[in-house]
Image (cartoon, helix red, strand yellow):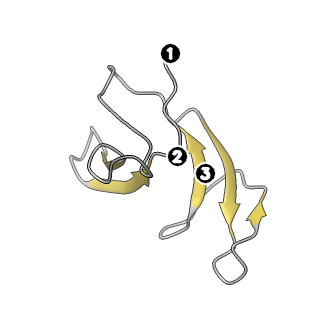
Protein backbone atom coordinates (compact mmCIF):
# COMPACT_ATOMS: atom_id res chain seq x y z
CA UNK A 1 0.00 0.00 0.00
CA UNK A 2 1.30 3.42 -0.92
CA UNK A 3 -0.78 5.38 1.60
CA UNK A 4 -4.13 5.60 3.37
CA UNK A 5 -6.08 8.52 1.94
CA UNK A 6 -9.04 8.45 4.35
CA UNK A 7 -11.40 6.29 6.37
CA UNK A 8 -15.17 6.27 5.79
CA UNK A 9 -17.39 6.65 8.87
CA UNK A 10 -19.81 3.74 8.50
CA UNK A 11 -22.90 5.56 9.84
CA UNK A 12 -22.51 8.94 8.14
CA UNK A 13 -20.33 7.92 5.15
CA UNK A 14 -18.20 10.99 5.92
CA UNK A 15 -14.53 10.77 5.00
CA UNK A 16 -12.18 11.13 7.96
CA UNK A 17 -8.39 11.43 8.12
CA UNK A 18 -6.73 8.12 9.02
CA UNK A 19 -3.25 6.68 9.42
CA UNK A 20 -4.45 3.06 9.68
CA UNK A 21 -7.52 1.00 8.85
CA UNK A 22 -8.73 -1.53 11.41
CA UNK A 23 -10.23 -4.90 10.45
CA UNK A 24 -13.46 -4.46 8.46
CA UNK A 25 -12.89 -0.71 8.09
CA UNK A 26 -13.75 1.07 4.85
CA UNK A 27 -11.39 3.65 3.45
CA UNK A 28 -9.59 5.06 0.47
CA UNK A 29 -6.03 3.92 -0.22
CA UNK A 30 -3.42 4.19 -2.94
CA UNK A 31 -1.86 0.85 -3.88
CA UNK A 32 1.52 0.03 -5.38
CA UNK A 33 1.40 -3.22 -7.34
CA UNK A 34 4.25 -5.62 -8.15
CA UNK A 35 3.32 -5.57 -11.83
CA UNK A 36 0.74 -3.88 -14.07
CA UNK A 37 -2.79 -5.32 -14.17
CA UNK A 38 -5.72 -4.87 -16.52
CA UNK A 39 -8.19 -2.71 -14.63
CA UNK A 40 -11.07 -0.32 -15.16
CA UNK A 41 -13.00 1.81 -12.70
CA UNK A 42 -15.77 -0.22 -11.01
CA UNK A 43 -18.40 2.06 -12.61
CA UNK A 44 -17.25 0.80 -16.03
CA UNK A 45 -16.66 -2.88 -15.24
CA UNK A 46 -17.75 -4.87 -12.20
CA UNK A 47 -15.17 -7.53 -13.11
CA UNK A 48 -12.10 -5.41 -13.95
CA UNK A 49 -12.98 -2.88 -11.24
CA UNK A 50 -12.53 -5.17 -8.23
CA UNK A 51 -9.52 -6.71 -6.51
CA UNK A 52 -8.96 -9.28 -3.79
CA UNK A 53 -5.81 -8.40 -1.83
CA UNK A 54 -3.69 -11.34 -0.67
CA UNK A 55 -0.85 -11.21 1.87
CA UNK A 56 2.17 -12.60 0.03
CA UNK A 57 3.71 -14.00 3.23
CA UNK A 58 0.71 -15.93 4.56
CA UNK A 59 -1.26 -16.30 1.29
CA UNK A 60 -4.39 -15.24 3.21
CA UNK A 61 -6.92 -12.71 1.99
CA UNK A 62 -6.13 -9.36 3.58
CA UNK A 63 -8.76 -7.20 1.93
CA UNK A 64 -10.91 -6.34 -1.05
CA UNK A 65 -10.92 -3.23 -3.19
CA UNK A 66 -13.05 -1.35 -5.69
CA UNK A 67 -11.14 0.69 -8.25
CA UNK A 68 -12.55 4.21 -8.41
CA UNK A 69 -10.08 5.48 -11.01
CA UNK A 70 -7.41 3.84 -13.10
CA UNK A 71 -4.14 5.73 -13.58
CA UNK A 72 -1.36 4.87 -15.92
CA UNK A 73 1.95 4.79 -14.09
- Residue 33 falls in image quadrant: top left
Q: Return the mark for residue 73.
A: 1
- Residue at x 71% of width, y 50% of height: 19
> From the viewer's perspective, is residue 30 above or below residue 62?
above
- Point out the tag, 3 or 1, that comes first from the N-terminus: 3
Residue at the location (56% across, 65% down)? 26
Q: Mark 2 — residue? A: 68
Q: Secondary structure at mark 3?
A: strand
Picture coordinates of residue 28, whole percent (x, y): 60, 51
The residue located at (37%, 56%) in the rendering is: 64
Task: Identify the mark nearer the N-term, 2 or 1.
Answer: 2
Question: x and y percent of residue 14 in the render?
Answer: 75, 69
Mark with earlier residue (3, 2): 3
Instruction: Give the answer, above or below, for where 61 lies relative to 12.
Output: above
Q: Are marks 3 and 2 in contact (CB under 8 Å)?
A: yes
Q: Determine the secondary structure under disc 1.
A: loop
Picture layout, residue 7 above or below residue 2? below
Q: How many marks?
A: 3
**Between 13 and 52, which is closer to the camera in this rendering?**
13
Q: Nearer the viewer, residue 61 or 26?
A: 26
In the image: residue 22, left or right of residue 33 = right
Contact between marks 3 and 1 (CB within 8 A): the answer is no
**Mark 2 neighbour class, 10 Å CA radius: few under 14, some 14 to 19, many 20 or more:** some
| Residue placed under numbered mark 3 in the picture | 28
Image quadrant of residue 12? Answer: bottom right
Q: CA distance from mark 2 to mark 1?
A: 16 Å
* Dot 2: element: loop
Amino acid sequence: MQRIVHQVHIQTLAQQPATQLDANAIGGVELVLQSPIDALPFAQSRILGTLVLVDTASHKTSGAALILSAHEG
